[in-house]
Image (tube, rainbow, N blue to C red):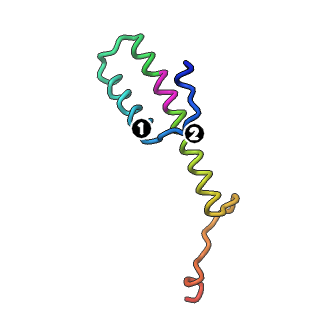
Amino acid sequence: MSKTEKTEEPVDFEKALAELESLVEHMESGELSLEDSLKSFERGIALTRQCQQALTAAEQKVEILTGKDGEDGVEAFAADERH
């Protein structure tokens, strides 16, 4: 991985996913050389990892915001308890 690929900026999930989809389509076309296919595959793996990290971070934020500390189940609203 080159220095330009190692950025400290947050991953833009939608852009990374769009690039990944484009890479897959290009690779499936069968028009790439073996060397270009391997480069595209390597980039695809990096994008997949970035997307997974972004999803994990989002999941953690949701758990923090909802106060779910590993608890299973759903809490009822106060209005629901009166019925």
Three-letter code, disc 2: Gln
Q: Of the residues tagged 2 and 1, which is closer to the observer?
A: 1
Q: Is residue 37 left or right of residue 42?
A: left
In the image, the segment drawn in magenta is 42-47
Residue at 53 percent across and 24 percent down: it is: 5
- In the rendering, at what x and y percent does residue 59 appear? 58, 51
Q: Tell me which amino acid carries mark 1.
A: Lys
Label 2 or label 1, whichever comes before in sequence order: 1
**In x, y percent, where is residue 38?**
45, 16
| Quadrant location, the N terminus | top right
Towards the viewer: 11 or 45 = 11
Quadrant housing residue 68 = bottom right
Nearer to me, 48 or 54: 54
Q: With respect to residue 81, does 14 lie above or below?
A: above
Residue 53, disc? 2
Where does residue 15 sit, x and y in percent of width and height? 42, 38
Label placed on residue 15: 1
